[in-house]
Image: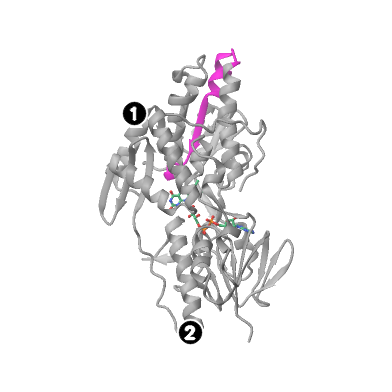
Amino acid sequence: MSKKRVVIAGMGFGGLRAAKALGDSGLELILIDRNNYHLFQPLLYQVATAGLEEEEIAYPLRGLIRGWKNATFLLAEITGVNVADRTIQTDGETIAYDYLIVAAGSRTNYFGMESVANNAFDLKRLDQAEDMRNQILLMFERASRESDISRRKALLTFVIVGGGPTGVEFAGALRELIVYVLSKDHPTIAVSETRIVLIEAADSLLTAMPEDLREYARHKLISMGVEVMLESKVVGATEETVELFGGMTIGTHTLLWSAGVAAAELAGAIPGIERAGAGRLVVNADLTIPGHPEIMVVGDMACCLANGAPLPMMAPVASQQGEYAAQSILARERGATLPPFRYRDKGAMATIGKSSAVAVTRGFKFRGYIAWLAWLLLHLFYLVGFRNRVVVMMNWTYAYWFQERQVRIITAKKRRGGRS
Ligand SMILES: Cc1cc2nc3c(=O)[nH]c(=O)nc-3n(C[C@H](O)[C@H](O)[C@H](O)COP(=O)(O)OP(=O)(O)OC[C@H]3O[C@@H](n4cnc5c(N)ncnc54)[C@H](O)[C@@H]3O)c2cc1C
């Protein structure tokens, strides 16, 4: 009898964990992704701020499956799923499945604001992180030759929208890049000429954190020189301005959008499935989709309720769901069933700058150096690949002691990545 085939669509946090759990199971495994690597998205902001090289936060998927007898990797764009035929369509072949784990993640959500989508930088992919780094370095190069004061000011103004972990981490890292590195590279530019504005629609940063940690993060950023604007909404943008609700305009060439995500496009290419907020696919308590026990959706794409609210779009949710999906398939193959998926919330953390972070876990709150150290160690632990861990640790140690960022390389003078 031929082996049952499991197809995993998307090799991010959810897909990777599912693949690892199924690697030696004896089932036939087909892993599909549009990239030939797994990307550690939480460190993209460090690539964008010249702290890490691209390769250090990516892991080649063919390296992962070496030694797994029944596994194949396919570099392909998945274009749809035919739930009736049990096939998955790609830009090349059509692939049949017995079980399907859909783990295609999310894309940036501009909430229908075309002008923002056309002008903002985005931080979901490696090429976008590189574009962002090029932009920051190019703005300094152009400002150093610009004599008109208002044009120079706009070149040296960086606007970040979204006060979640990505916005906070990026703002802190960019400020450190400017203060410790770029101001030395460009002696004609004073730090006081530069401006970083962090804009958040809610009345605090890091809304998932307890109140005192949110306030700590805000004060810390302000003390570093970041302007924090709360209860402010961006409503439009051009190449040289950002427009706020109420009519205020900020002159800038650099707008980073980190204010929203929605389910990946693939969610719209799986017909007949109910979609919830942000286009996420509504799943049963065992992560299957209604009427199709052979299909499981995990991670950012899945709308899975816990205590009546959807689970957040976070890496631990995706990883735990990927593990559950794999275990559920293995259990079914043994004729057993697993109890419903239960998310084990291990907490949240965000780093603000050197020796400064906030973290909450099981009701315990940490901030400052201890939280920062915990952040470093956890990110090293979860980063995929031994070499990546070693190189990232060396880079962080170097940056800590010498306050330098080595990756100050402009690789393209024009933006190459599109929006995601
Ligand atoms: C900048 C940034 C910082 C973040 N920081 C944190 C953090 O600090 N902590 C935290 O918990 N979470 C963080 N997150 C969120 C976290 O990364 C996501 O929740 C997590 O990656 C979701 O995992 P996933 O498996 O659902 O999707 P992903 O990890 O996004 O993986 C989806 C995969 O599917 C592939 N794919 C998508 N569509 C297709 C297609 N049509 N064809 C082929 N392949 C496809 C993609 O290439 C990708 O490899 C951050 C996200 C970003 C962008």
x, y (%) of residue 290?
A: 53, 75
**Residue occupying the point 52% across, 14% down:** 188
Q: Nearer the viewer, mark 2 or mark 1?
A: 2
The residue lying toward the viewer, choosing from 176 and 197, is 176
- The boundaries of the magenta stretch are 145-165
x, y (%) of residue 195?
A: 47, 25
Q: Is residue 235 above or below residue 420?
A: above
Question: Which quadrant of the figure contains the N terminus?
Answer: bottom right
Disc 1 marks a residue whose amino acid type is Ser
Marks 2 and 1, Cα distance to the nearest angstrom? 58 Å
On residue 334, the disc is: 2
**Residue occupying the point 48% across, 45% down:** 43
Answer left or right for 403 relative to 250. Answer: left
Answer left or right for 12 relative to 228. Answer: right
Disc 2 marks a residue whose amino acid type is Arg
Q: Residue furthest top?
A: 147
Mark 2 lies on a secondary structure that is: loop
Q: Earlier in the sequence, mark 2 or mark 1?
A: 1
For residue 50, say whether it is visible. yes
Label 1 crowding class (10 Å Cα cut-off): few <14, some 14-19, many 20+? Answer: few
Residue under pointer 1:
223
